[in-house]
Amino acid sequence: MLKITLPDGSVKEFDEGTSALDVAKSISHGLARNVLSATFNEQTVEITEPLPGDGALTLHTWDSPEGKKAFWHSSAHLMAQTLEQLYPGIKLTIGPAIENGFYYDIDLNGHNLGEGDFPKIEKKMLENARAKSAFEMREVSKQAALDFYQDNPYKTELIENLQDGEITFCDHAEFTDLCRGGHLPHTGLIKAVKIMSAAGAYWRGDENNPQLTRLYGISFPKASMLTEYLELLEQAKQRDHRKLGKELGLFTFSQKVGQGLPMWLPKGAELRERLEQFLKKAQKAAGYEPVITPHIGNKKLYETSGHYAKYGKDSFQPINTPEEGEEYLLKPMNCPHHCELYKSEPRSYRDLPIRFAEFGTVYRYEQSGELHGLTRVRGFTQDDAHLFCTPDQLKDEFKKVIDLVLYIFKTLDFQEYTAQVSLRDKEDHSKYIGSDENWEKAESAIKEAVAEKDLNYKVEYGEAAFYGPKLDFMVKDALGRQWQLGTIQVDYNLPERFELEYTGADNEKHRPVMIHRAPFGSMERFVAVLLEHCAGNFPTWLTPKQIAILPISEKYMQYAHKVSDLLKNYDLRAFIDNRAEKTGRKIRDAEVSKVPYMLIVGEKEQETNSVSVRLHGGEDKGSIPLEEFAKQVQQKIDQQIAAFN
RNA sequence: GCCUGUGUAGCUCAGUUGGCCAGAGCAGCUGAUUUGUAAUCAGCUGGCCGGGGGUUCGAAUCCCUCCACAGGCUCCA
């Protein structure tokens, strides 16, 4: 007999040879129909195979990530089977389940594959699915596996790295694949498939390796789920910052100016300025001092910082002067300039911490394939600051920066965020500069600060900047997509390289520690993320046009001006729609341009010195006395943007 | 940079077995309308069909090449 412990803690007995699927059947028919995969003693098992002994069993359905994983993993097999049928001679490599679906990397061996081929692949996949072929695992010897894949160098490479005894194949129908396991019982559960895109991907992610074709797909147990998923994608497209940015007249690009160089239109510039003012105010309260430094710097500056050695060849190339031997770089970062500011006079421990803040525009030559709207550009403005402090002050300063970042997220309504502590690669230290000792000090300062701030965070090794570890903040937008925004980085290396010093209480010279930080990250990326987060409906304090005044007809224009003047006195941003259009039209246009408040003014309002208020989205607030309305909006704004302290 | 795809008016898009002067809606302009909670009517303007080269009697349509954009890979100070 087998003793099986279920997640609710109950223990049930089963005959030897019982599978996870049998267990599901014993619980309910519904569960048996819906179970997709199983975890046994924390290991993924095939749900149709006998359980190996006593233990804890968890059954997974579509509602759990494990269930989806098995579903998509199995779908990858199905796609591979289909591709082999359609394109004989192709070489399969790897095909994992991913967050939304699955992919398979294939060496097409001369075949060509584009979007036009997707429907026929989808059709054939569904045909294969309907055969309800069972997925069956079997163990193979290393030699047998190598023999099977003698024409496939990719699979052989994978097998070479495995031990005899741990190599398994998975069969379904006539198709066989090297596989670790975790499948659906049979292909028939896959009811809807969609090939999403074809893309190039290097074998093992290394650009020196051959480029394979990566086919992305997604599949579902119900056709309606696919429709829903495609609708969700459509929604995401609607709030794409590139689309909204154009519609709202915030920014633009010009081929003539150059790739990846965003230009801010008046409304966008106004928005950005407002964000900057907001942060400047908070930074002032937090003891930062604004500084301004030039857009270019002598190449030697970046040789000192180490950036030139690391990024020089892949950057915008140096600017030459009429004088021989002088070379300047467009600044790719602000820190070397700020280090020189620090050095402009002798510093005492009494001066520290020093916090230099600058909205500094920097230029980086990103690879052309990497450019994307405002989130990935070649010229952008960082809300940068560099904090110089004593080693003793480090942790405290770090915590204060965390507070500032969280204040910004809260004000801008990013409720869900996660923090990522990025540390050095555990084994390979060659890509980093600086001593092991300094790295360890910096890493533990971050870990402690984060622990004391009680942040929800994860640790990633190998994600650190080359000069120091960092804490990155990721936010989720309204559609659940993750974006990296703010960053806080500890740096012992630049102070070393720039020979920064302060005189301590002991009258000796000491080296300060630096913190680089940018809560928004870059103004460009932040505006992009904010746009997508709020679907273009900015909070009232931030939006370029807060109030649309819509006179019913020309007769009320004078009153409309009176309303406008009064709102101006309250520091509210209103405009009059003075076109000879019907009210319905004016409302529609204000709705489309996402103005939060619409004031309809006609005879009634003029007589009672009031306004008829309609909110963006359609809510009718009825008539409100003019001054009262202004006060209400002002109050609302004050709530939205509470002060930092 | 590499792979795959896309590029027609300010915007969204029709138009490709190669064939009259390349179309629509919206926006813009002009005029009429003076309007009460998501589009008033009419007229007009606007395009080297991404750039260059080629095939052809003839190219938005076929071929080559460059550029930009999109998705992905690689990268991200």
Image (tube, coloured by chain):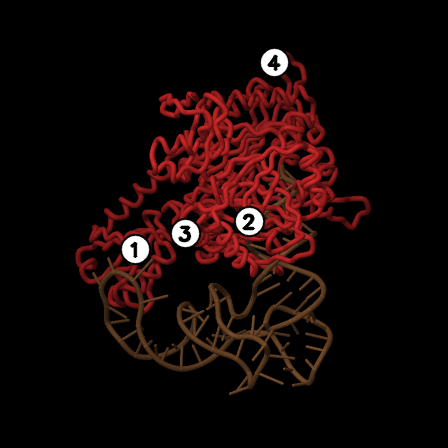
Chain colours: A red, B brown
Disc 4 target residue? A505
For badge 3, the amino acid type reads: Ala
Q: Is residue A208 visible?
A: yes
The reply to whether the C-beta atoms of the residues labelled 1 and 4 are less than 8 Å apart is: no
For badge 1, the amino acid type reads: Met
Q: Could you say whether the residue bearing mark 3 is in a helix, strand or loop?
A: helix
* On-image quarter of the C terminus of chain A: top left
The reply to whether the C-beta atoms of the residues labelled 4 and 3 are less than 8 Å apart is: no
- Mark 1 or mark 4, whichever is nearer to me: 1
Disc 3 target residue? A223
Disc 2 target residue? A79
Q: Residues within 10 Å of mark 3 (few under 14, many from 20)?
A: few
Q: Nearer the viewer, residue A284 or B70?
A: B70
**Which of the chains bears the disc numbered 1?**
A
Q: Could you say whether the residue bearing mark 2 is in a helix, strand or loop?
A: helix
For badge 4, the amino acid type reads: Ala
Residue lying farthest to the right in this orientation: A324
Q: Could you say whether the residue bearing mark 4 is in a helix, strand or loop?
A: loop
Closer to the N terminus: mark 3 or mark 2? Answer: 2
Q: Are marks 1 and 2 on the same chain?
A: yes
Closer to the N terminus: mark 4 or mark 2? Answer: 2
- Mark 1 or mark 3, whichever is nearer to me: 3
Q: Residue at coordinates 78% horizontally, 44% vertically from top-left?
A: A326
Between the C-alphas of marks 3 and 2, the distance is 17 Å
